[in-house]
Amino acid sequence: EHPLPEPPPYMEYQGILFPANNVKKECLEAMKTFKISDDDVVIVSYPKSGTTWMFEVVHKILGGKKENLSPIVPELWLPGQKEPAYVQLRDSPSPRLMYTHLQPKMAPPGLAAPANKVKAIVVLRNPKDICVSYYHFSQKCDHLKTPDSWEQYCKDFLDGKNLYGDYFDHVLGWWQMKDDPHFLFVKYEDMKKDFRSSVKTIAACLEKELTDEQLSSVMNSCSLESMRKTLAESDTFRKNIVRNGMVGDWKNHFSAEESARFDQKYRERMAGTGLEFDFQ
Ligand code: A3P
């Protein structure tokens, strides 16, 4: 008898799908002239790559207090906010810390401009675990459509019909900046394997020297369990971010056939790029 709730709307912009309740066309248009300053720090990622984790690490390294930890994503306009994020950001003083899920062709042009000194940290993660993470997140998050089935979700992801566009286009688009000294590429799997070294590398990129005590403090407050606690009390946007934080959870979801199709596409797209991921 009850009508089904309306699924949240998606919109397409330049061939890429966005969650229309949070990303408006005018915000994407505004990115073309959105100014990035030399002293800004921008985290870049495909969704579910460990963006929030990186954000917390960078925020802590920069000595940020909990009170001013409001992740700012220039392309968003969240429901209930009277202004889009880029307007708030435009008016806030540098250095600003922000993150974006946009591909280079849509991101503010100053970000990927070789002459720019902005620090860009790109977080990368293997596509199988991203697909699983996004599938679960989509079931929990109000602004995302609940997937019809895992099989369909996995197929669409591999066909590039996912929010924020094709995973490979995204990752390989940013990977073109790999030799730019203002870009740091960090893999989720490496952060899991050796968090201490990753934090040190990130701190060095930010030109911050951490004492052993500071290093331990960053590591403690950015552990999976600390973040689970902190984010549980956070806004609806972020409270479902921390799930199980594993490398290789894809094995609990992929059939042998799905895995083989993924592997084939992965080999085709990654061939000759020098980019490789750990899957376990
Ligand atoms: P899973 O869903 O596989 O658990 P994003 O912030 O880009 O949306 O990424 C979310 C993913 O990062 C989730 O992956 C989440 O569990 C994981 N994550 C968040 N904080 C983490 C942490 N401190 N350590 C390890 N993984 C973390």
Image (spheres, helix red, strand yellow):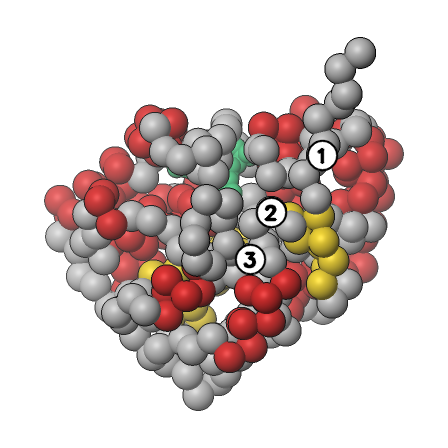
Q: Which residue is mark 2?
A: 21
In this view, the mark in front (2 or 3): 2
**Of callouts 2 and 3, the N-terminal one:** 2
C-alpha separation, residue under disc 2 versus residue under disc 1: 11 Å
Identified by mark 1, the residue type is Pro
Q: Which residue is mark 3?
A: 101
Q: Please determine whether, in this image, residue 19 is positioned above or below residue 229.
A: below
Seen at 46% across and 33% down, the residue is 236
**Of callouts 2 and 1, the N-terminal one:** 1
Q: Residues within 10 Å of mark 2 (few under 14, many from 20)?
A: some
Seen at 44% across and 58% down, the residue is 83
**Which residue occupies the foreground of this view, 137 or 197?**
137
**Of callouts 3 and 1, the N-terminal one:** 1
Residue 73: which quarter of the image?
Answer: bottom left
Residue 32: which quarter of the image?
Answer: bottom right
Helix or strand or loop: what does disc 2 sit on?
loop
Q: Position of residue 58 (x, y in %)?
A: 31, 54
Q: Please determine whether, in this image, residue 64 is positioned above or below residue 224.
A: below
Q: Position of residue 142 (x, y in %)?
A: 58, 33
Lateral position of residue 50 relative to residue 226, left or right: right
Q: Which residue is mark 1?
A: 7
Q: Residues within 10 Å of mark 1 (few under 14, many from 20)?
A: few
